[in-house]
Image (cartoon, helix red, strand yellow):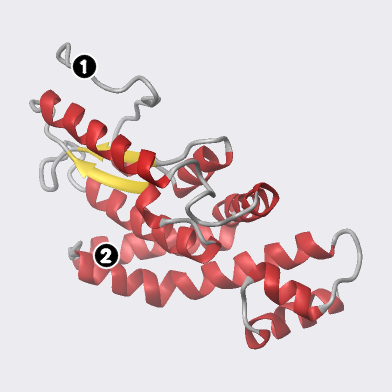
Amino acid sequence: MARQTYPPYHRVIRVMCSGRVDPLFVMEAFKNGADAVMVGGCKLGECKYIEGNFQALIMGEMVRNLMKLIGINEERFKLEWISSAEPAKLVEDIKTYMLKIKELGPLGSSEGLKKEDLSFYLDSAVEVCKNMQVRTAFGNVAKELKRMQDFSLETINKKVEEKLLPLLKNKLYEIEVKSLLKDGPKSLDYIVEKTRASVEELNPILSKIMKT
């Protein structure tokens, strides 16, 4: 980074394009001990793959929604756009972000999550990101936005909320419920407390599990 001085307590992982960063990568980073994830890419409109960083915007919106569902502070994930000719800006962005995360403390502390609960939610989030229905829906949102040629944050937020968020919630709760029940029956109150879902949201999931 042009011999700039920057904090040592971070790990750089190079990818071909910010658009190649999968939501699964972010959740697995958290699961494996990262306190925050920053994805850096070319400035919007300057991607050599044309729409790569716009795809990253869609990924970022899915990640934030999933983080919100499992109770992780959304500030622990950040998208930053930097030109390849701006190493000093990249270093400054890393420094600033590291200070912010230092204020938040280790993952789970500012969220008030116990270690076992944090592990439970992150394991569930990782499985959601692996789910083929979710991955297909995520891809379909990206294709629709590409057809529309509209990558404004407003449109991305709207499409993710309409086409992806309901499925994210449903699959997350289903995965969490199955995980909770694998060791035996649990009370409805316990399941509601652990999943933080409403009884109305859980009823169809429980009915489906009982039939299988």
SS type, badge 1: loop
Horizontal arrangement in the rendering, residue 173 relative to residue 143 (left or right): right
Image check: 167 left or right of 197? left
Q: 177 or 115: nearer the eye?
A: 115
Q: Residue at x 69, y 73 (%)?
A: 193
Q: Residue furthest left?
A: 85
Secondary structure at numbered mark 2: helix
Cα separation, mark 2 vs mark 1, equals 39 Å
Going by the numbered disc 2, the residue's amino acid type is Leu
The vertical placement of 94 against 211, above or below, is: above
Q: Please tell me which residue lies in front, 62 or 140.
A: 62
Q: Which quadrant holds the N terminus?
A: top left
Q: What quarter of the picture does the C terminus occupy?
A: bottom right
In this figure, which residue is indicated by the disc labeled 2? Answer: 145
Compared across the picture, whether 25 is left or right of 38 comes to right
State yes or no: discs 2 and 1 in contact (Cβ < 8 Å): no
Residue at image coords 35%, 54%: 60
Q: Position of residue 197 (x, y in %)?
A: 62, 76
| Position above or below: 133 against 199 | above
Residue at 59%, 49% (x, y): give it.
126
Position in image of residue 111 (x %, y %) = 51, 56
Q: Quadrant of residue 198?
A: bottom right
Determine whether 152 is above or below 211 in the image.
Answer: above
Tell whether 15 sits left or right of 113: left
Single out the mark in the foreground, 2 or 1.
1
Q: Which residue is mark 1?
A: 5
Residue beneath the point at 85% across and 78% down: 210
**Identity, as a three-letter code, of the amino acid under mark 1:** Thr
